[in-house]
Amino acid sequence: MQKAVHKALVEVTSPEIVALALKEARRSPMRRFKNGAVIYDKITKKIISSGCSYDSDPGYQKVATIHAEMDAIRKTDKNGLLYWDCLVIALNKTGNATYSSCPCITCASLLSDCRVRNIIYHQQLNDGSWVVMREWPAGLLNRANEVNGKFARHQKIVAPI
């Protein structure tokens, strides 16, 4: 992962949380993109759960992909999932950060339903610069088809890189 992206994510969360998200992303058996997600308590920095992306049935041709966010939600205590944050990291096959680790609409909806307070992800802007974003899950749903680089009021650039 690019050092600048890694450093900015550590500043926003903690070294342990970023290390676990990277470990989960590297553990993913997916070939093109390897995603890792960590759900954690923002105040205490306690890790609640983590997950990686994988195929639901690798031996079958038409399979559903389980996203890292879905895997992390699946591993939590369903009654205790209350107002936590979620860090999402995406790596390409060479181990570098992909252009964006922004969750898809389905994962944003699941995180919103589970009352996750903030989603933290990295994104490369149109000018080639990198930022770490903090966003409400509902905000992702509201701007599903918005052009990259236009920020809504519910988004916050927490670390220009």
Image: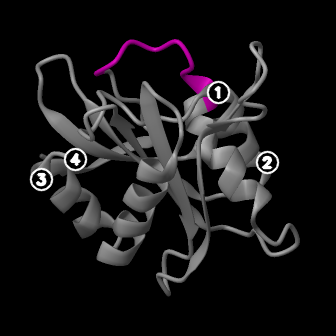
Q: Which residues are magenta?
A: 141-149
- Among the 4 quarters of the image, the one containing residue 124: top left
Given the image, on which type of amino acid does mark 2 rest? Asp
Question: Dot 1 lies on which element?
Answer: helix
Given the image, on which type of amino acid does mark 3 rest? Lys
Q: Which mark is residue 105?
A: 1
Residue drawn 12% across the image and 31% down it: 129
Q: Would you name the residue on which mark 4 appears?
A: 1
Residue drawn 36% across the image and 31% down it: 100
Marks 1 and 2: in contact by CB < 8 Å? no
Q: Would you name the residue on which mark 3 appears?
A: 3
Marks 4 and 3: in contact by CB < 8 Å? yes
Q: What's the distance in space between the residues labelled 4 and 1, CA to CA?
A: 25 Å
Q: Is residue 66 above or below residue 10?
A: above
Query: Mark 4 or mark 2, which is nearer the start of the sequence?
Result: 4
Q: Is residue 88 among the parts visible in the rendering?
A: no
Given the image, on which type of amino acid does mark 1 rest? Ile
Q: Is residue 69 above or below residue 146?
A: below
Q: Is residue 20 among the parts visible in the rendering?
A: yes
Residue drawn 52% across the image and 33% down it: 30
Query: Mark 1 or mark 3, which is nearer the start of the sequence?
Result: 3
Residue drawn 19% across the image and 49% down it: 5
Q: Residues within 10 Å of mark 2 (few under 14, many from 20)?
A: few
Q: Would you name the residue on which mark 2 appears?
A: 113
Query: Mark 2 or mark 3, which is nearer the start of the sequence?
Result: 3
Q: What's the distance in space between the residues labelled 3 and 2, CA to CA?
A: 33 Å
